[in-house]
Amino acid sequence: MESDKTRAPREVRLDHRQVRVLAHPLRMRLVGALRVKGPSTATTLADLLGTNTGATSYHLRQLAEVGLVVEDPDRGTGRQRFWRAAHDVTNWEASDFDDDPDARAAIDWIQGDQVRLLAGHAEQWFASQHEWSPAWRDAFGMSDSVMTIPAARLKAIEAELWAVLERHRLAADPNEPGAERVQIFLAAYPLLKEFR
């Protein structure tokens, strides 16, 4: 069996139904937790996310109906069901949903939730950065770049950055002394109108 380290990430390009189902706070958190923590039961996920098992089970079934999570047949016994994320990466193009106002609204919510997640991570980092070594404090952080380019070049930059991240993911040794799990966000937005 191929390990997560050596296999290419499983990707899904969201369809209209998946987008509508995913645009829910607990469902987003469930998919995220399964991607980060790996297969888990509804009870374990409920404890992790501070909710109840009934709500967790219901929302896992909703995600399963559209193929975003699946039962893990290699785990669990009897009534104990383990779930795993069906994909490692979720993709879409904003224009995929131009013809569907409900799906477009769902994508808007999902993207807003991603920004809220980034802001939450940044706040936690600022509050705890003193607990990290100088090497990690120097490695973490944000930067930005301003350029005047066409959309095709921006797409090419994005693809190249993803390829770099994937190359480093495959080359990394999680057992290397001092290795930590990190989350890298990539974002590109138009320059604020007052600066254009």
Image (tube, rainbow, N blue to C red):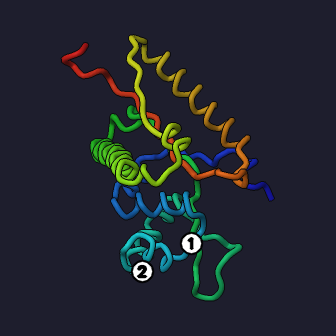
Picture coordinates of residue 118, whole percent (x, y): 38, 46
Measure the C-alpha gap from mark 2 to mark 1.
12 Å
Q: Secondary structure at mark 1?
A: strand
> Residue placed at 60% from the left, 70% from the top?
71
95 up-or-down from 80: above or below: above
Quadrant of the rendered image containing residue 163: top right
The residue under label 1 is 40
Q: Report crowding for label 1: few under 14, some 14 to 19, many 20 or more residues within 10 A (C-alpha).
A: many
Picture coordinates of residue 1, whole percent (x, y): 80, 59
47 up-or-down from 162: above or below: below
The residue under label 2 is 53
The quarter in which the C terminus is drawn is top left
Q: Earlier in the sequence, mark 2 or mark 1?
A: 1
Q: Report crowding for label 2: few under 14, some 14 to 19, many 20 or more residues within 10 A (C-alpha).
A: some
39 up-or-down from 181: above or below: below
140 up-or-down from 20: above or below: above
Picture coordinates of residue 141, whole percent (x, y): 44, 38
102 or 145: nearer the viewer? 145
Picture coordinates of residue 66, whole percent (x, y): 48, 59
Kindly identify the amino acid type of the residue bearing the numbered disc 2: Thr
Q: Secondary structure at mark 2?
A: helix
